[in-house]
């Protein structure tokens, strides 16, 4: 079937895709590029690739023999380079064919396409561009692209003019050599009215500095005020700080720290120099001066051959390295099609592993030679180091004694804690630690809060580096065994009260016992782990949902579930008075009030029934006190 306006063709004949250029530009602007501002990066990138190709023609020349000149006065944006230039054949082949690259044209497989001005991609490692679509980004801010180019490959080559329009049409014509006396390329854009935000002179200058501050070729900017023959202001006057020569190591360290502060806006706790010659990567990692939430990953500033690729490249470091922010410049990392992130391949994986090793080495050096720096680092970033130590035996053995933990002796390192406690007990949750901390401390037990991320696992590895220390999980029985029993006469006198208290608290599966322990100001201790509460809740729900024989079986199993324990302190004056209460209702109310206070002191979430009990017992005690006074 032939469409009305389409010429008929033989059945099975090949046809060529028709490209709607406006639709393609819209696709790029909404789904490939993050912002129209990338047009300037693409133009700079094309110019750098052209200069690289020009140098390959005369490799003995200095790196700064050729340069890039930017001009923006509000009416036009112009980018001029002294690069390899284009012949008329190159213009038809590469500027007029979307996605065409010289590498594909030369018969190289298209797995890694290369883009550039003319035939400049003979060696992929020398060039930034890859995909053959960068020039289209200019249509994000202009309806017409004007290119004038002269090839450096052909002596006495004429100048060639190419005009491409947003509707997909273009024209090519040959100009006399005088139209461009020297080889190179000039791209001129006439901005649309709605693109002023990105094409004003100040913005063009700012974008040039943003993307090109580390470029190896000289880049200048002119806003029209320099006058005829003016050189314009330098965009990248200084090389990267790691590429400069410094008089002393201290001066180098200070220069790197100052650059990190300039880029990231904070004064680094320390600066780690990064150098991976195998992939041509250099840069710095700035240690953050403040803690960051666990798992939060900062973006890193990545340049490829001097051109800024991304300010949010999370993938260049492993997840645990969230205590640094990096700025690096690499030769061999591969950008994605948008050139705003890195392609995940074996090279990137190897770079990530190598940079992780550099961070480990920095931690090791600090541990060995700078304990003050190590202390400040661990005080701020102990969570990051703990996450690393869990998976890295070397770091674990090196730093575990110095890592801070919450203990019954306050916040202390495991090394300090192990000096006074040869047996270290560790809780499984924060709430369990809070329940027992004061009592355990008074009893002389050494307990570490294992409820925080990584802490319990790391504490259990302490014997690997301190064989004289034993570590065990804390259970209610361990603590109860360290509480002193009351004498038989006192227990018998309190038996009636304890029975009424057990009956009142049966709804919470809570047993009640009388002991003596310090501090005497604590009237009661509630021992009830999260696991025990979960098991009791599960058994209760199962019992309610089953009946008959199954209900009886589940009921028997429920009786074996771990119960909570309310330990009353005979040393506390309030408890000594409570156990003598002879009025049954008042005894029950006082037991409920003691349970409620102990539950609140544990700082765990209260169940609705417990909140109701606390309110009810308070009001009942208040009513009793008012009746007694009246």
Image (cartoon, grey):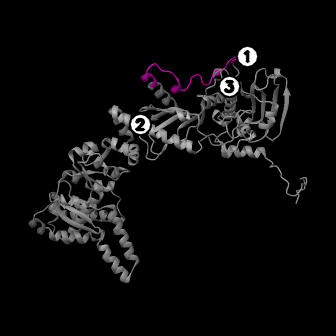
Near mark 2 (Cα within 10 A), the count class, few <14, some 14-19 or many ≥20, is some
Near mark 1 (Cα within 10 A), the count class, few <14, some 14-19 or many ≥20, is few
Between the C-alphas of marks 2 and 3, the distance is 38 Å
Circle 2 sits on which residue?
A: 361
Left or right: residue 1 compared with residue 479: right
Q: Nearer the viewer, mark 2 or mark 1?
A: 2
Please say if the residues under marks 2 and 1 sit with CB atoms less than 8 Å apart. no
Helix, strand or loop at disc 1? Answer: loop
- Which stretch is magenta? 226-252
Q: Is residue 183 placed above or below 430 in the rendered structure?
A: above
Task: Tell me the chief SS of the magenta region.
Answer: loop
Whether the magenta-drawn stretch holds residue 231 is answered as: yes
Circle 3 sits on which residue?
A: 55
| Residue 243 position in % (x across, y down) | 53, 25
Quadrant location, the N terminus? bottom right
Pick out the residue farthest to the bottom. 548
Between the C-alphas of marks 2 and 1, the distance is 54 Å
Quadrant location, the C terminus? bottom left
| Residue 241, numbered circle | none
The first of marks 1 and 3 along the sequence is 3
Front-most of residues 515 and 578: 515
Q: Residue at x 23, y 48 (%)?
A: 468
The first of marks 2 and 1 along the sequence is 1
Near mark 3 (Cα within 10 A), the count class, few <14, some 14-19 or many ≥20, is some
| Residue 228, numbered circle | 1
Q: Is residue 304 placed above or below 394 in the rendered structure?
A: above
Front-most of residues 251 and 492: 251
Pick out the residue farthest to the left. 489
């Amino acid at each position: 079937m032939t469409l009305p306006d389409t010429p008929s063709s033989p059945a099975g004949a090949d046809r060529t895709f028709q490209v709607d250029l406006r639709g393609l530009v819209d696709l790029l602007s909404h789904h490939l590029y993050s912002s129209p501002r990338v047009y300037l990066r693409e133009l700079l990138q094309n110019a750098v690739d052209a200069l690289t190709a020009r140098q390959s023609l005369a490799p003995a020349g200095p790196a700064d023999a050729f340069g890039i000149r930017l001009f923006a006065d509000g009416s036009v944006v112009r980018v001029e380079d002294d690069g390899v230039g284009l012949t008329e054949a190159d213009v038809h082949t590469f500027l007029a064919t979307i996605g065409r690259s010289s590498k594909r044209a030369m018969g190289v497989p298209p797995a890694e396409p290369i883009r550039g001005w003319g035939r400049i991609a003979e060696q992929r490692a020398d060039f930034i561009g890859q995909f053959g679509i960068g020039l289209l980004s200019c249509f994000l801010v202009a309806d017409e692209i004007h290119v004038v180019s002269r090839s450096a490959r052909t002596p006495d080559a004429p100048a060639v003019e190419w005009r491409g329009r947003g509707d997909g049409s273009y024209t090519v014509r040959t100009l006399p050599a005088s139209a461009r006396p020297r080889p190179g390329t000039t791209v001129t854009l006439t901005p649309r009215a709605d693109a002023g935000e990105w094409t004003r002179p100040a913005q063009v200058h700012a974008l040039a500095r943003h993307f090109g501050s580390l470029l190896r070729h000289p880049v200048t900017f002119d806003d029209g005020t320099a006058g005829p023959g003016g050189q314009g202001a330098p965009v990248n006057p200084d090389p990267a700080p790691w590429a400069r020569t410094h008089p002393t190591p201290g001066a180098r360290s200070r220069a790197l720290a100052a650059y990190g502060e300039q880029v990231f806006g904070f004064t680094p706790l320390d600066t780690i120099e990064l150098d991976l010659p195998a992939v041509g990567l250099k840069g710095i990692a700035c240690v953050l001066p403040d803690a960051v939430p666990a798992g939060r990953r900062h973006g890193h500033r990545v340049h490829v051959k001097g051109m800024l690729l991304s300010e949010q490249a999370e993938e260049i470091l492993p997840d645990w390295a969230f205590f640094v922010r990096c700025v690096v410049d690499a030769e061999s990392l591969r950008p994605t099609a948008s050139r705003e992130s890195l392609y995940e391949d074996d090279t990137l994986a190897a770079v990530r592993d190598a940079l992780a090793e550099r961070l480990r080495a920095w931690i090791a050096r600090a541990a060995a030679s700078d304990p003050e720096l190590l202390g400040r680092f661990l005080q701020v970033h102990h969570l990051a180091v703990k996450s690393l130590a869990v998976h890295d035996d070397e770091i674990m053995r090196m730093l575990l004694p110095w890592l801070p933990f919450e203990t019954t002796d306050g916040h202390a390192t495991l090394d300090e804690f192990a000096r006074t406690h040869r047996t270290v007990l560790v809780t499984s949750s924060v709430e369990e630690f809070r329940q027992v901390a004061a009592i355990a401390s008074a009893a002389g037990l050494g307990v570490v809060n294992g409820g925080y991320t990584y802490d319990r696992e790391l504490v259990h590895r302490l014997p690997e580096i301190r064989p004289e220390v034993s570590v065990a999980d804390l259970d209610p029985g361990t603590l109860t065994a360290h509480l002193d029993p009351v004498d038989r006469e006192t227990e018998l006198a309190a038996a009636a009260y304890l029975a009424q208290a057990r009956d009142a608290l049966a709804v919470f599966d809570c047993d009640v016992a009388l002991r003596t322990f310090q501090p005497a100001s604590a009237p009661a201790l509630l021992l009830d782990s999260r696991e025990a509460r979960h098991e009791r809740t599960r058994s209760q729900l199962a019992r309610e949902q089953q009946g008959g024989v199954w209900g009886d079986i589940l009921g028997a199993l429920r009786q074996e579930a771990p119960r909570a324990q309310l330990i009353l302190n005979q040393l506390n004056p309030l408890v000594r008075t409570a156990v003598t209460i002879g009025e049954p209702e008042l005894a029950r109310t006082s037991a409920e009030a003691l349970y409620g206070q102990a539950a609140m002191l544990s700082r765990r979430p209260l169940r609705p029934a417990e909140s109701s009990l606390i309110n009810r017992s308070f009001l009942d005690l208040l009513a009793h006190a008012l009746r007694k006074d009246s």
